[in-house]
Image (spheres, rainbow, N blue to C red):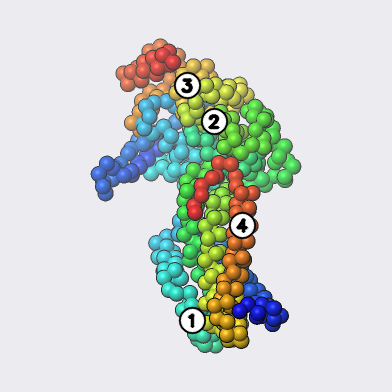
Amino acid sequence: MNEIVMEAKHVYKTYKIKGDKKGEMKYVEAAKDVSLQIRKGDIKLIFGPSGSGKSTILRCMSMLDFPDKGEIYLGDLCLTKPGVDLNKARAKIGFVFQHIYLFRHLTALGNVELALRQVLKLPKEEAKKRALAALEEVKVTECVNKYPSQMSGGQAQRVGIARAIARNPDIILLDEPTSALDPELTGEVIDTLRDLAKEGTTMLIVSHEMPFAKEVAEEMIFYDEGRIIETGPPSLFFNAPNTDRAKQFMTRIINRTTRE
Amino acid sequence: MFEFLSDPYTWTLIIEGLTLTVSITLFGVLLGLGIGTLLSIGDIYGGKTIKALIAVYVEFFRGSPLFVQLFIAVYAVPAIINIQIDHAVLAFLVFGLNSGGYQKGYMKGAIETIFNDQMDAGLSTGMSRAQTLRHVILPQAYRIVIPSWTNEFCSLTKSTSALAFVGLFDLTAAGIALRFSTFQILPVWIVIGIIYLIWITSFSKIMDIVYEKKRIPGIELNMQ
């Protein structure tokens, strides 16, 4: 078995949000004792109802949100220990956002180049070469000098992926990379992810793209109400999940997909 | 009525006054930009103490008349610290500090509109908070803030007339001198007013051009 790239151990995270009434606070338990492991070359897919905390677990793994309890490991390094250089750790973790979040004042090239220059401290020419290679890999060479608002959603998200892979991270975390896109644009992003999968990129993806999951994921993780409910290969979920909740959810998802 | 305009001495006075007005506004607004940026970052990131100190600072400079601040700086401060400092230098500092109090508000507003998602994006690439601020947040905030900054410049230029009260020779002081030498009260002030108007309008036009040039597709928020 390959070495473990990333691991979450008994992670808890509760959010405080404003309630319906004035002054009222609600607590959302987005992660309750969540543990998962990703080995080199793994592609794992987290799915489940919206609001169940899927994004939270991804944000906790990259330490964009700090877990209340539990540990996050990147290789041997425990990220939840105080005093760890999180910036250095995040440089080894690619992150793709649901709402893309490109740097709005920079072109596609600028978006990919920035971290190469500032984090990896590459010289200008070298950074440009690597940024262009990453943009070529996700097939958006036509956008090199375009600003985010001049791109389609699909192009922008592929630039987002290029920004995440340009540093050659150990793992890429993708938070619903296609769900903010128009249906006809999801295909191009899925194609890009498929290419990455073929190259053996280690990925943890939150997504409901079931045909894609079936094709590339080694393991699917059904997540609901802050917990991992069931884990298994796609064949398990597509044939006969063990839990009722997963069964119901799969039926809903598959019906929706066929209706479309 | 306007014969005094043909007297070269009139123009010597006006040019001398205008030079001080222009240089104090430009430096003041730039110093204010630096101070405003630091204060806005402090106000977003800082703990309770820092936030409270910033609030006191801002309320002092926004809440008291500029000429009172000038009087304190020019007459009280040198006496207290017992060092003679050039009045123009003190005035320049007061304008910078005062403008910083206002510009903190503009910068904070601009930063907050872009802050959360762009900070996450920056951190996710391995950049530190400081690097993300410098390379991602501030370049966007400055573009958004240009129109407010132009407003600040216009109002600061007119506030420089308070310089005459502390014995500095700005454009208004030039007007006062001309008034006494010509006794043409209204014509003198009309001429002085037109010179303010020309200077402020041309500078605003230049800033409008800068705003258009620097405008990034996708950042079209106008905070004016």
Q: CA distance from mark 1 to mark 4?
A: 35 Å
Q: State the residue in front, A118 or A199.
A: A118
Q: Which residue does the image show at 62% across and 66% down from the upper left?
A: B199
Q: Residues within 10 Å of mark 1 (few under 14, many from 20)?
A: some
- Image position of B25 with respect to A13: above or below: below
Question: Where does residue B114 sit, x and y in percent of width and height?
Answer: 50, 47
Q: Residue at x 32, y 39 (%)?
A: A28
**Observer-nearest residue: A120 or A176?**
A176
What residue appears at the point 61 percent right and 70 percent down from the top-left corner? B195
At mark 4, the secondary structure is helix
**B10 relative to A190, above or below:** below
- State the CA–CA distance, disc 1 to disc 2: 57 Å
The answer to which of A50 and A9 lies nearer the viewer is A50
Answer with left or right where residue A66 lies relative to residue B140: left
Mark 1: secondary structure: helix
The numbered mark at residue B205 is 4
Q: As shown in the figure, which amino acid type bears the numbered disc 1?
A: Ile
Q: Which residue is mark 3?
A: A209
**Residue type at numbered disc 2:** Gly
Amino acid type, label 3 = Glu
Task: Mark yes or no: residue B117 visible.
Answer: yes
Residue B215 is labelled as: none
Quick one: label 2 or label 3, which is nearer the N terminus? 2
For marks 2 and 3, give the CA distance.
17 Å
Which residue, given by chain and number where applicable, does mark 1 sit on?
A: B72
Does any portion of residue B173 appear in the rendered image?
Answer: no
Q: Chain of mark 4?
A: B
Tag in front: 4 or 2: 4
Question: Do labels 4 and 2 touch, CB within 8 Å?
Answer: no
Image spot of residue A174 (x, y percent) = 51, 31
